[in-house]
Amino acid sequence: MFIGKCRRTAIVALAVAATTLTLGTAAAQSNVDRLRAEVQANPGSVVAWVALGNALYQGGQYDDAKTAFLEAIALDYRSGDAHYGLGLSEFARGDFQAALFEFTEVTRLHPDRFDGHFNRGVTLARLRRPQEAANAFREALAQAEPEASNDDRVGAHIALAGQLELAGDYAGAAEAYASALEFEPENADYILRRGQALHNAGQGLVALPELTELEARSGDYRVSALISDIYVSQGQIDYAIWSLERALEKARTAGDGAAEASTLIKLGTLQRSLGREADAAESYRLAAEADPNSWEAQYNLGVTFLESGQPQQALAALTRAEQQGGQGRADVALALATAHDQLAQPGEALAYAQRAAGGLSDAQQVATARFIAGRSHYRLGDYRAANDEFRAVVQARPSDPGAHLWSGLAAYQQGDYATAVASFERAVQLNPNSVEARANLGAAYLAAQRYQDAENVYTLLVDQNARDMEALYNLGWALFSQNRRSAATDAWVSSCELGYQPACNAITTYL
């Protein structure tokens, strides 16, 4: 973003900094001294105060420049140059609200001034008000004649495009980039930006011919990478991988390790989406070699290991990701929590899960973090805290049988058997084939003294697997509790013969 030209003053700023002065330091100070003498000799001259303000601004003396412009405004409030200079001074001082007021006054008092509208847009952009900034840049373009040069107009179109992108109007941004290209049709950066805006607007195919032509004459890997993104959006994964390989060649030719790593990460992500975990892991490994400081490469490598059931390797990669810049990132913390959870390290899993839950914005990811935290609390013996976490997960994921199962386990450990029964029943409803859910439901029925219901559950489990020793043992208890000793004996004997010692003990003790 930059401050544009003023047609009536000597101020020209770029990237919020004054242009390089043509005068030496001594000569510049001499000019300021001369102008101070002029305003002392003619304190009622608006022109003299504005000239002094301009010189002070160019010399970086923003506070003094502000004072000079205020003197000019006090003499003539309608002086557009005084308001404009004061706006530049306030902007340079970091008082963007004051700068906005001054540039707004320029446009109110002199609505035909391109520079007033343009710099009002720049200030609104700095204040992160993209829609208003876009409107200001549009008005600047409407007032471009005769003041603005072609460079000024290009700058306004690019600034407009940037603000429209921030506002989510990608189609409008693409049009603004197209307007800039009318002045500079060979500008590769603008072609790339227009292609990205069209892709974001869901019109990537419109950009493909122009991007393909640019790819043929450009060594910029980003062009090929964007073409790959467009192919992905169209479901053409093979074409996308082919384009990424071209991007990879360009990055390597340029010796750009960071670009090579970025491209390899995208390639790995595509490979992972196709179920090619080994290829994805290799791409991430190569990315880490290309850019040893890339935490993204290590993070994605770690996630791939997690998905392929290799938590120990995942932990090593994710630890490196944290050390290389991923510290404080909620997604890295969630992956680390997952790795520690899979490795049955509840203390570490809990710490990372809590860190992740506090930083994530996606509700489902937060639920995942809280699920891991709940399981960690459970393994550490804090069943009340575990139950709090699982209840939150159940609210976020009411159709998740695992959440209901663990919520039931936490309730059971607290002696709340009625709640445990309800949770296990829901888990069975959601996943009728889960032996674990049915077995825990049977245990909850026993604890709640619902012996007939427990008998029904364990009978079904034994029917499914006649060698289920624990189901036979618990069936015996359900029958014994109903005073059906003969049937209980049969169940315990069968369990004992299969080698389940508690059943053998029960026969000795109770029969």
Image (cartoon, rainbow, N blue to C red):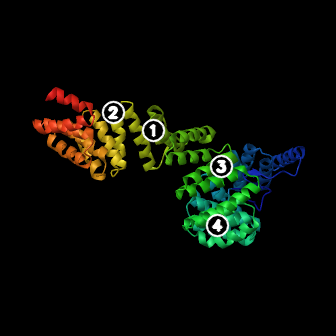
First in sequence: mark 4 vs mark 2 = 4
Give the alpha-carbon distance from disc 1 to disc 2, as whole Å: 17 Å
**Of pointers 1 and 2, the one earlier in the residue sequence:** 1
Query: Which circle's residue, 3 or 2, is located before the other in the chain?
Result: 3
Whichever of labels 4 and 3 marks the residue nearer the N terminus, that label is 4
On the question of residue 139 being in view, the answer is: no
Looking at the picture, how far across and down is residue 491, in whole percent?
18, 39
Q: Is residue 148 left or right of residue 304?
A: right
What secondary structure is marked by label 4? helix
Position of the N terminus, as image quadrant, is: bottom right
Q: CA distance from mark 4 to mark 2?
A: 54 Å
Residue 111, image x, y percentages: 66, 65
Question: What is the number of the mark on residue 55?
Answer: none
For the point 23% across and 34% down, the residue is 496
Q: Which residue is tagged 4?
A: 195
Residue under label 3, please give it. 287
Name the kind of residue labelled 4 in the image. Gly
Residue type for callout 1: Asp
